[in-house]
């Protein structure tokens, strides 16, 4: 024990007077191992801590703090209580020692055994004895334990925090201050008379690029909203943008109660900025703020005696903007339209309120004219409003479109065409295409005569023959998929062309354009199907169309295109693995088994050599060799009710093998095929019979031992509900009559009895096969027979 005390004194001396910093680690390790305690360390530091030299006292406190940082988890409550008292006293010492004291308090604040009342005591000492700006806010507030006791201080804590933060300039300290301020608010501290002081001490940093400022200020609506209105009167563009963005952030968390008293002033400021500013950033921020305010009011819960705040606010907006849409002076037409669009885009209900007022006004304006005037804005504004609302609310009906006069429809079509060619925003472009598609159903002629020619010109721009109806397209013009800026305009045109193809007259105009593009892209290229950009995206869109479309021709064509593209792709994981995994699925097992029919049979189109598909030599034999064993194994392991799926898959594969391969593999597969004849699935029965019938014409020797099993399964199928199964089974029975007489004679009577029923079958083709088979079996063993 004495040796440990001597060693501790040596370590303390080396650190304090010898300036050997590494000794702190040795002391911490000794405390962790139990060689000596924290209180023993305090005793060993006694002379250092009471030295008249501030540097010596500082080194002593520094050593203790560094050890506490490593060992605070092992402290007892009594030890923590003593150390807290010691460090609080040290805060009154020389200012050079304070950073080390704060370091020690930070370690103590992490202790789970912090005695009751210590958190409040530490905080009061910090507020009383530490000059924040000298030592940094971060150092001071890192020492404050995150303790529920602090909440009890209420206004005293808030006042101390305000004093500590006031005048802080270090960005790192500001971030910490904002975090603490946010916790003060959201954890329900009693702000009392210091509410305004807390707001002012944080709002002085607004507007700056600190997002946390915004999060704090939104908690003081009665102070923040007047501040925003004040800042919007500033001449600084950045201040205006920051204020409008803060307003938008506020609207996402406020309710109509917080906003109601300030709505007229807020609207007046937003309207002024949009009407008068020359800055796009200010205009955009103003429109976003208006939309956020409207969205907030849409979420308001109405009571029986409360007014609809959304209607009240939109009445202000409509009153100040509606009349500008009808005035000859064009200066405020589009700013007004943008404000109305922003308000209507906030919600479906807001959209209905705005369009119900604005669109009839526009219709009344141009219906009162005798002719379409140059520079008239009514129809473009009307069309733009429709497009904008479609961006946000696709289900919104198109009002009054059916009552447009022909000149107005033509003007609307021209405006939509201009938007297709010039609008770069993908969301707006999609809405333009949908709007054009809806209008084209009512007025196909203007689209055929005005929009489609413009789209053709844009699609074929740069062509070597611009004057012909359908000019030749260069290979590098056929890059139509999104993601390529060079062809973004062409892509928008194609999307619009597809959208307006809603009537036969329009399809007759648009289809030749698309067909020529396909033909031109194919001309002079090897069919072995072309470097397709964004291949995976194209596959995804084809897959979605084939799975979701309700139009048979569309989803069938999409599936064929998908198959053709997959066929040209480099070999990857074997597709059969996925199919095999589905054969254990209760819902998809049967369809998975049918996939083998598609894989093994000749495709009438797309996947054949005449369509330039990649068809490898002897692929059926390879597929059979690789997968037949898996199917047989799956059949043997499957439950009785699920064996039919594997029988169906095997029969599909074997039925499509070349005959010579069938004869070679029949001996090993015959037991499974016989089981397939007992399967209740008529598709399995027919596929198996079609496989067996040609093999029975030249049967393998192994068949002689399986004749009884074969007849016992084959003859009942002559009475199957399926006509195709009855015919196929009769042909197999007929084929068996050609076997050597000594092999089939024992079955003659049984077969003749079974063939009596098919002779009276209601289907002529069945009766025909029965007559042929029965005639051959009568001759077996008869005098004069074969």
Image (cartoon, rainbow, N blue to C red):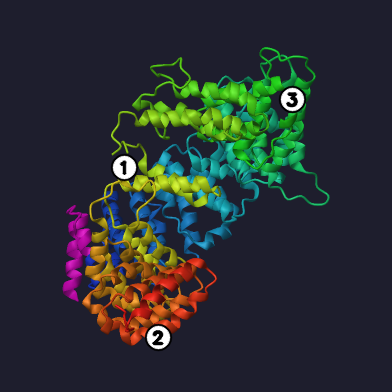
* Percent coordinates x, y for residue 189 in the rendering: 59, 55
Q: In 3D space, how far apart are the residues under numbered discs 3 and 2 (Cα atoms)?
A: 90 Å
Which tag, 3 or 2, sits closer to the chain's start? 3
Please name the residue that numbered disc 2 is placed on. Answer: 750
Which tag, 3 or 1, sits closer to the chain's start? 3
Numbered tag placed on residue 362 in the rendering? 3
Left or right, 375 with respect to 238, comes to right
Q: Is residue 780 above or below residue 625?
A: below
* Percent coordinates x, y for residue 274 in the rendering: 63, 25
Please name the residue that numbered disc 1 is placed on. Answer: 612
Quadrant location of the N terminus? bottom left
Left or right, 122 with respect to 656, comes to right
Q: Residue at x 20, y 65 (%)?
A: 9
Q: Nearer the viewer, mark 1 or mark 2?
A: 2
Is residue 243 visible from the viewing direction of this image?
A: no
Q: Can residue 595 be found in the magenta stretch?
A: no
Q: Residue at x 76, y 39 (%)?
A: 311
Q: Nearer the viewer, mark 3 or mark 1?
A: 1
Q: In 3D space, how far apart are the residues under numbered discs 1 and 2 (Cα atoms)?
A: 52 Å
Judged by its main secondary structure, the magenta piece is: helix
* Percent coordinates x, y for residue 779 in the rendering: 35, 79
Q: Residue at x 62, y 54 (%)?
A: 190
- Circle 1 packing at 10 Å, graded few (<14), some (14-19), many (20+), is some
Please name whichever residue, 294 or 627, is drawn nearer the observer in this view of the structure: 627
Secondary element at tag 2: helix
Quadrant location of the C terminus? bottom left
Left or right, 649 with respect to 376, comes to left
Q: Residue furthest top?
A: 374
Q: Which residues are magenta?
A: 1-27
């Amino acid at each position: 024990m004495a040796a440990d005390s001597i060693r501790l004194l040596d370590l303390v001396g080396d650190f304090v007077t010898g300036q050997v910093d590494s000794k702190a680690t040795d002391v911490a390790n000794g405390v962790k191992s139990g060689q000596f305690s924290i209180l023993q360390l305090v005793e060993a530091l006694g002379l250092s801590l009471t030295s008249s030299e501030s540097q010596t006292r500082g080194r002593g406190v520094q050593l203790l703090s560094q050890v506490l940082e490593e060992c605070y988890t092992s402290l007892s409550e009594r030890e923590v209580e003593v150390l807290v008292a010691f460090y609080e006293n040290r805060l009154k010492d020389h200012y050079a020692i304070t950073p080390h004291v704060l370091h020690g308090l930070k370690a103590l604040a992490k202790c789970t055994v912090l005695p009751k009342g210590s958190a409040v005591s530490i905080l009061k000492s910090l507020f009383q004895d530490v000059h924040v700006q000298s030592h940094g806010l971060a150092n001071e507030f890192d020492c404050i334990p995150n303790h529920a006791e602090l909440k009890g201080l209420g206004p005293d804590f808030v006042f101390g925090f305000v004093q500590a933060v006031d005048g802080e300039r270090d960005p790192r300290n500001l971030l910490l201050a904002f975090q603490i301020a946010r916790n003060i608010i959201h954890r329900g501290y009693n702000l009392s008379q210091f509410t305004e002081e807390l707001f002012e001490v944080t709002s002085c940093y607004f507007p700056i690029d600190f997002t946390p400022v915004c999060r704090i200020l939104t908690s003081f609506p009665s102070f923040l909203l007047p501040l925003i209105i004040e800042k919007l009167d500033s001449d600084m563009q950045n201040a205006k943008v920051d204020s409008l963005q803060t307003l938008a952030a506020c609207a996402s968390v406020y309710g109509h109660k917080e906003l109601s008293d300030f709505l007229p002033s807020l609207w007046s400021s937003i309207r002024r900025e949009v009407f008068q500013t020359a800055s796009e950033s200010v205009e955009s921020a103003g429109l976003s703020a208006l939309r956020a305010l409207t969205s907030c009011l849409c979420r308001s819960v109405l009571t029986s005696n409360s007014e609809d705040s959304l209607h009240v606010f939109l009445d202000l907006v409509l009153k100040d903007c509606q009349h500008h849409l009808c005035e000859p002076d064009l200066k405020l037409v589009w700013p007004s339209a943008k404000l109305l669009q922003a308000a209507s885009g906030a919600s479906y209900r807001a959209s209905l309120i705005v369009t119900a007022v604005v669109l009839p006004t526009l219709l009344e304006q141009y219906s009162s004219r005798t002719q379409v005037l140059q520079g008239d804005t009514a129809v473009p504004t009307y069309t733009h409003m429709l497009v904008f609302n479609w961006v946000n609310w696709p289900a919104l009906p198109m009002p009054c479109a059916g009552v447009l006069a022909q000149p107005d429809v033509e003007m609307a079509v021209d405006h939509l065409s201009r938007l297709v060619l010039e609008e770069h925003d993908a969301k707006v472009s999609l809405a333009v295409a949908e709007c054009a598609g809806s209008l084209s159903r009512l007025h196909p002629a203007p689209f055929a005569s005005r929009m489609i020619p413009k789209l053709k010109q844009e699609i074929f721009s740069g062509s070597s023959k611009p004057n012909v109806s359908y000019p030749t397209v260069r290979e590098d013009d056929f890059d139509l998929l999104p993601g390529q800026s060079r062809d973004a305009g062409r892509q928008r045109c194609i999307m619009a062309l597809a959208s307006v193809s809603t009537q036969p007259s329009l399809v007759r105009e648009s289809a030749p354009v698309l067909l020529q593009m396909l033909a031109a892209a194919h001309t002079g290229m090897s069919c072995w199907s072309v470097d397709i950009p964004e291949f995976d995206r194209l596959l995804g869109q084809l897959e979605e169309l084939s799975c979701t479309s309700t139009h048979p021709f569309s989803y069938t064509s999409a599936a064929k295109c998908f198959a053709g593209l997959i066929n040209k792709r480099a070999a990857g994981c074997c597709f059969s693995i996925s199919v095999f995994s589905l054969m254990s699925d209760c819902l998809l097992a049967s369809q998975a088994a049918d996939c083998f029919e598609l894989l093994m049979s000749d495709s009438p189109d797309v996947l054949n050599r005449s369509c330039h598909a990649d068809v490898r030599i002897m692929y059926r034999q390879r597929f059979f060799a690789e997968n037949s064993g898996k199917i047989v194994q799956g059949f043997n392991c499957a439950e009785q009710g699920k064996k039919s799926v594997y029988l169906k898959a095997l029969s599909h594969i074997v039925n499509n093998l070349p005959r010579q391969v069938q004869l070679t593999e029949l001996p090993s597969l015959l037991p499974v095929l016989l089981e397939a004849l007992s399967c209740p699935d008529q598709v399995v029965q027919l596929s198996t019979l079609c496989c067996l019938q040609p093999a029975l014409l030249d049967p393998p020797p192994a068949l002689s031992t399986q004749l009884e099993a074969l007849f016992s399964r084959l003859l009942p199928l002559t009475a199957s509900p399926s006509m195709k199964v009855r015919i196929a089974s009769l042909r197999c029975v007929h084929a068996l009559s050609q076997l050597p007489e000594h092999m089939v004679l024992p079955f003659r009577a049984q077969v003749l009895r079974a063939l009596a029923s098919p002779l009276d079958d209601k289907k002529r083709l069945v009766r025909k096969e029965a007559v042929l088979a029965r005639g051959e079996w009568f001759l077996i063993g008869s005098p004069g027979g074969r």
